[in-house]
Amino acid sequence: MTLKHTFKTAFNGVKTNKSRSGLTILGIIIGITAIILVMSLGKGAEELILNQIRGLGSQTIIIEPGQEPRGPSNFAELFTNSLKQKDVEALKNPANVQGLKELTPNVMQVAPISFENESVRKNIIGSSELITEILEIYPNEGSFFTDDDIRQKNSVAVIGSKVKKELFGDSDALGKKIKIKGRSFKVVGILPAKGQVALFNIDELVIVPYTTAQLYLLGINYFNSIIARAENEKIVPQVVKSIELTLRETHNITDPEKDDFHIATQALAVERVGMVTGILTALLVSVAAISLVVGGVGIMNIMLVSITERTKEIGLRKALGATNKDIMLQFLLEAMILTGLGGIAGIIFGGLLSFIASFILSRIVSLDWTFAFPVSAALLGLAVAALVGLIFGLYPARQASLKSPMEALRYE
Amino acid sequence: MFLIEVKDLEKTYYDGQTATPALRDISFTINQGEFAAIMGPSGSGKSTLLHILGFLDKQTAGDYFFNGKTMNDYSKKEIAQVRNKKMGFVFQAFNLLARTSVLENVRLPLIYSEIKESFWDNLTLKAIEAVGLSHRLNHLSSQLSGGEKQRVAIARALVNNPQVIFADEPTGNLDSKSGKAIMETLRQLNLKGQTIILITHEKEIADYTQRIIFFRDGRIERDSGAA
């Protein structure tokens, strides 16, 4: 028998038992739906995080105090005051670190800000002009504070568009004095609305000179981070190495395991995020895969029942000249058509559900979420479904092929 | 050469220690073009014989030659081909595919044959015409009467133009009127040269044939056509 007719025969077998076929593949539909949903949402989550990281720029290097966080029980907090002015000086020295274009220390705090009767709590960042380049955001009213402001610890501030709106409404803010933690700051610049960039909501930021923030707002002599820029993307690993060596020297550290700082770059972060979401997705997919196994066992079960029920048909086909191979192929194909159809239905349902989820996440939760439908996942889903049919159809198909044709001649 | 030659055939079923003889000392021959009935009460071994004649089962001892060859001369695949090309089967319970049209039921043996697909329609229509069901081509098997169902089964047995048709109690599930009509159809086919071996326990059905081989307790009691 030609493959075409085996396929037709198998397809007719599925078609003539519509409701049973439908119930049989329910398990496969659910399994594939779950896999597509998980993979699609996983991809979307990964994109969301990666987009934020990419906002940092590929030349950006972030130095943070404390050991690299390695799990829930780390001692990172013990060393959060390890980055100081002398580190900044050492890093700025080209003899220590070559290829470093600029760097800025940063401090951060959430603090109350007020103007006249309006008061809000916002993220205050103590930084320098370099942050505008890194976040790619420049005041559209006024200007950023200068290096002189930093040296002289002047009380000046650049505010985000939403902060401006909340404190001043539609009236002019430039040159006005706002109060941060009770101290007066002159508004010198206003940032345009830009939303989320690299983990910051620009619109809700207040940026002041880091020296001013250290002295008057926080009363500390250390930094929460140092952001640096390499001259180009290629030398980033080299610059990272030099920064590590320099900081170990200024901190008197000989054992790299005891570093009281850690360094992040876009490449490192992208790699880490990819790994984390990859592991998570794999984990969830393997949980979903269990339902496929259950579905496969269900198919095997129904196939075995169906073969007993169709003993006469099998016997008849054999009496009419079907070989064992013909029968085996017919039932194997039936199983694979069943699971294949289940796979297609699962892909459609999974895609639909993840589209709905994306819609909710982007419109209602207003995340910067994009709908991702991984074609590879769909193909994988279909292949897995067919494979489930092949594996779980093999035994029933073999049982069918071994049936004696005399069964058809025997009348009960 | 005889179409069918059976020599000292024996068949014994073994169930653990107990041996149940089903056929003993069976010898007869059938020529091309014969219409023979194997008749006997139930349990006389006639179905067992039909299974052996149809290459569906093997004898315990003795020889069975079909076209001068035994089952051992063929591979499993070739046996399937012999059944497909040289033999046609008609069963008591019709054994049509459910929810499938007359056309597709009759075509069934062709999909297992080596005959080119372009000839299938012609062969199928010819076989259906031979049993007088041309007006029922697209009816589903479940929409047919018992007599019509058996006609479809006969058309299915005919479609590959076999050397012999084995009919196992073809009228057993039919009322006497439909039964007679079926026997008339078989007789007409025989008159055109079709070899038919019929199994029945009814004398009036067997009387439609030219020769009756009467079985009792696994042996041939008498053979009306024995030379």
Image (cartoon, coloured by chain):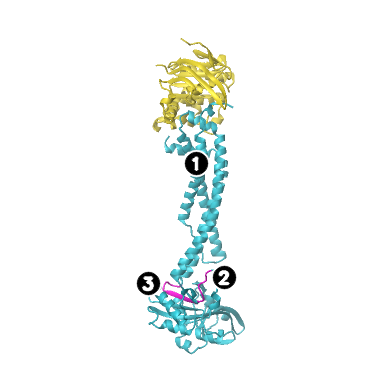
Asked if both marks, 3 and 2, belong to the same chain, the answer given is: yes
Q: Magenta segment, principal secondary structure? A: loop
Q: Which residue is mark 2?
A: A73
- Among the chains pictured, the one given yellow colouring is B
Asked if both marks, 1 and 2, belong to the same chain, the answer given is: yes
Whether tag 1 and tag 2 are in contact, CB under 8 A, the answer is no
- Of residues A112 and A282, the one drawn nearer to the viewer in this rendering: A282
Describe the element under mark 2 as helix, strand or loop. loop
Kindly give the residue lying farthest to the bottom in the view shown.
A152
Q: Residues within 10 Å of mark 3 (few under 14, many from 20)?
A: few
Q: Residue at x 54, y 84 (%)?
A: A220
Q: Residues within 10 Å of mark 2 (few under 14, many from 20)?
A: few
- Among the chains pictured, the one given cyan colouring is A
At label 3, the amino acid type is: Lys
Q: Which residue is mark 1?
A: A394
Q: Residue at x 50, y 44 (%)?
A: A391
Question: Which comes sooner in the sequence, label 1 or label 2?
Answer: 2
Look at the picture and state if B61 lies above or below A94. Answer: above
**For residue A66: magenta?**
yes
- Of residues A336 and B53, the one drawn nearer to the viewer in this rendering: B53
- Quadrant (top left, top right, bottom left, bottom right) of the C terminus of chain A: top right
Q: CA distance from mark 3 to mark 1?
A: 54 Å
Describe the element under mark 1 as helix, strand or loop. helix
**For residue A67: magenta?**
yes
At label 1, the amino acid type is: Leu
Q: Can you give x and y, in whole percent of width and height, for residue A411 in the image?
A: 57, 26
Q: CA distance from mark 1 to mark 2?
A: 50 Å
Q: Can you give x and y, in whole percent of width and height, for residue B59 in the image?
A: 49, 22
- Chain of residue at mark 1: A
Q: Which residue is mark 3?
A: A234
- Of residues B44 and B181, the one drawn nearer to the viewer in this rendering: B44
- Residue B177 visible, this angle: yes
